[in-house]
């Protein structure tokens, strides 16, 4: 209930108490509860009639809620037919507002001849990806889960993807600009890795060709090496992350392309768009190629063309013979001890050298050019790591022996992890079954070769002035990006992907990226006190049930909600809230 002042007889202001409500179709309506009188007559009785009767309306609302509380003490449990809406999205909405995306899309929408709001659609996609991840159709069908008035059709949503996809780079730059100072984003080290996401289809997307047969647009969904070892077409993503574990930028590329060539353009683009200075790029051994090394750190110590740095993992088994021999040579190793999270001692040894390495890169894919680069090379040995590798290999060998004895039990998918220890193995491309079982044997030479390097791992870097420990600590940061990919695939349920046009695929991953950024910022705001799963689950549970008129019952509160209240300076402790109170909360 609230006070309403409107023109009456001869335009004299008339006051009355009005109750707001929604009809069966969801339209906002109101009904007069009590007529009060003309303002000019009431001013003869009260100093400020409007303030006086507003206070009365406030008191009556409080009394109504109190009566409802007493009434509900003897009421049966509310069943699932009662309208229920999520209110936990108020927290992601706070950060979403900081990112500035809504204002950006409002401005874009105002300049387009469209009948819907891009900002409403994208906002719904982001909130739903965090709290109730599902297909785009299901997201649309459940848009009433929120208190927002998302007034657009299903067709409008799909049509919006063509526009939203074009704004990807602008949105990512906007997010960077609005968070770099607010969240003290650190780019002294940046982390890069790739992953892929599968689609529930059996065919590859075709490339678009011009009249001369030249590729003008590559198909994204292509069969390639899948992280889940599936045969379905995949889309690959390269993700760049800052030193605090916050995502910065992403790129999509076809599933059949090599991940080794994607880091350079992503880094170059991000630095230019975000105006970032020198950074040390950290990546696993998959990105440790001569081309990437020369591009990032330059051709030699005197080269000033490229001034960034790198820290890469280095495969010892895949290295040249000189490096292998140096790595396992016991001369120069220093023994060290560190404590793990449970204060258990971990013994390991390490050594390093500054080495002039000869590399070759291709110029314009035509001629090979030789360079000499100077890098710090580090080798580590841990008995605990050696035991782990030996145990994993023994399990794979047992599986390989069983496959050799019973090839009919296995397919290409189920034999994953053991085939490298089997000579002469191949698979039927159509069925995935073992193709030739007549000459299968254990690859004893490979097993013997691997055993020599158990427990060893290596890191190489351009940062020759840093200590072993500093380099090791920098490289350890890669776990953050690995965890980030796990969040996208588990909490955000990014795959399988159910959209199919290039634009809709882009918007799908763009909304997932923004959802991921919001989650990571929430973790930072709570000083990583809670896991991302616990935060998301708490926000999902913080929902409201409409019990009478426009009064809603909140039936969940935990430590996460309490801490977020303090962080964002909002009060979510009330068991009963009117719709107008909820709207005030949501409008900040």
Image (tube, rainbow, N blue to C red):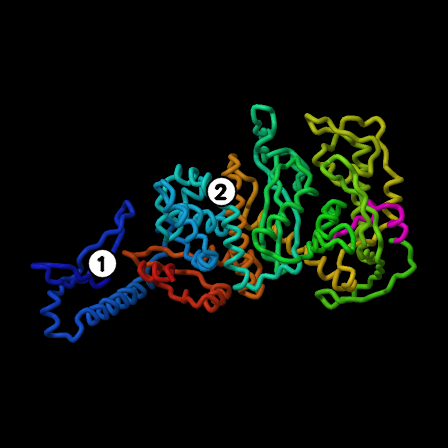
Lower position in the chain sequence, tag 1 or tag 2: 1
Quadrant, the N terminus: bottom left
Quadrant, the C terminus: bottom left
Whether tag 1 and tag 2 are in contact, CB under 8 A, the answer is no
Q: Residue at x 86, y 64 (%)?
A: 334
Residue named by callout 2: 166
| Category of crowding for the residue at label 1, using alpha-carbon neighbours closer than 10 angstroms: few (below 14), some (14–19), many (at least 20) | some
Q: Residue at x 35, y 57 (%)?
A: 76
Number of numbered discs: 2
Secondary structure type for disc 1: strand
Q: Quadrant of residue 425?
A: top right
- On screen, residue 431 versus residue 98, left or right, reads right
Examine the rendered structure and indicate whether residue 578 appears above or below residue 140: below
- On screen, residue 562 versus residue 83, left or right, reads right
Q: Which residues are magenta?
A: 312-326
Residue named by callout 1: 19
Examine the rendered structure and indicate whether residue 97 appears above or below residue 167: below
- Res. 202 visible in picture: no
| Category of crowding for the residue at label 2, using alpha-carbon neighbours closer than 10 angstroms: few (below 14), some (14–19), many (at least 20) | few
Residue 120, how many percent across, how many down? 40, 48
Q: Magenta includes 336?
A: no
Residue 568, how many percent across, how many down? 46, 66
Q: Nearer the viewer, residue 490 or 197?
A: 197
Q: Nearer the viewer, mark 1 or mark 2?
A: 2
């Amino acid at each position: 209930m609230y006070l309403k002042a409107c023109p009456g007889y001869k335009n004299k202001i008339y006051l009355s108490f009005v109750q707001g409500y929604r009809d069966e179709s969801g339209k906002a309506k109101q009904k007069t509860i009590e007529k009060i009188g003309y303002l000019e007559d009431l001013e003869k009785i009260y100093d400020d009639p409007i303030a006086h009767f507003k206070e009365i309306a406030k008191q009556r609302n409080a009394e109504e809620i109190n009566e409802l509380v007493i009434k509900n003490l003897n009421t049966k449990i509310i069943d699932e037919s009662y309208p229920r809406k999520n209110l936990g999205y108020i927290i992601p909405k706070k950060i979403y507002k900081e990112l500035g995306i809504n204002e950006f899309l409002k401005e874009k929408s105002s300049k387009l001849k469209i009948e819907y709001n891009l900002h409403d659609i994208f906002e719904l996609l982001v909130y739903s990806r965090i709290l109730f991840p599902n297909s785009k159709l299901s997201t649309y069908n459940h848009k009433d889960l929120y208190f927002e008035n998302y007034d657009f059709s299903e067709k409008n949503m799909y049509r919006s993807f063509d526009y939203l996809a074009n704004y990807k780079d602008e949105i990512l730059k906007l997010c960077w600009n609005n968070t770099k100072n607010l969240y003290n984003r650190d780019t002294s080290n940046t982390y890069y890795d790739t992953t892929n996401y599968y689609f529930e289809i059996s065919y590859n997307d075709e490339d678009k060709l011009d009249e001369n047969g030249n590729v003008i647009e590559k198909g994204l969904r292509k069969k390639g090496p899948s992280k889940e070892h599936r045969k379905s077409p995949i889309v690959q993503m390269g993700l760049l992350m800052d030193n605090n574990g916050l995502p910065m930028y992403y790129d999509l590329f076809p599933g059949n392309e090599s991940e080794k060539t994607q880091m350079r353009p992503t880094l170059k683009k991000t630095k230019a768009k975000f105006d970032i200075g020198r950074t040390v790029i950290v990546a696993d051994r998959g990105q440790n190629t001569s081309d990437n090394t020369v591009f990032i750190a330059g051709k030699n110590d005197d080269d000033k063309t490229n001034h960034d740095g790198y820290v890469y993992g280095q495969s010892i088994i895949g290295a040249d013979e000189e490096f292998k021999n140096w790595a396992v040579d016991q001369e120069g190793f220093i023994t060290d001890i560190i404590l793990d999270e449970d204060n258990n001692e971990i013994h390991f040894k390490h050594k390093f050298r500054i080495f002039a390495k000869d590399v070759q890169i291709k110029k314009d894919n035509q001629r090979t050019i030789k360079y000499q680069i100077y890098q710090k090379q580090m080798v580590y040995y841990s008995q605990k790591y050696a035991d782990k590798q030996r145990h994993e290999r023994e399990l794979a060998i047992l599986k390989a022996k069983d496959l050799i004895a019973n090839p009919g039990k296995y397919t290409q998918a189920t034999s994953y992890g053991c085939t490298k220890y089997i000579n002469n193995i191949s698979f039927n491309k159509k069925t995935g079954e073992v193709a030739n079982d007549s000459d299968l044997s254990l690859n004893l030479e490979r097993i013997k070769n691997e055993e020599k390097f158990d427990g060893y791992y290596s890191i190489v870097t351009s940062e020759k002035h840093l200590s072993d420990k500093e380099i090791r600590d920098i490289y350890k940061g890669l776990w953050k990006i690995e965890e980030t990919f796990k969040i996208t695939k588990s909490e955000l349920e990014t795959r399988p992907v159910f959209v199919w046009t290039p634009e809709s695929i882009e918007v799908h991953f763009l909304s997932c990226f923004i959802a991921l950024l919001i989650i990571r910022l929430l973790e930072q705001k709570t000083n990583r006190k809670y896991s991302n799963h616990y935060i998301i689950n708490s926000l999902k549970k913080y929902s409201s049930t409409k019990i009478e008129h426009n009064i809603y019952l909140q039936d969940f509160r935990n430590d996460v909600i309490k801490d977020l209240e303090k962080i964002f300076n909002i009060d979510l402790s009330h068991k009963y809230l009117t719709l107008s109170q909820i709207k005030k909360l949501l409008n900040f």
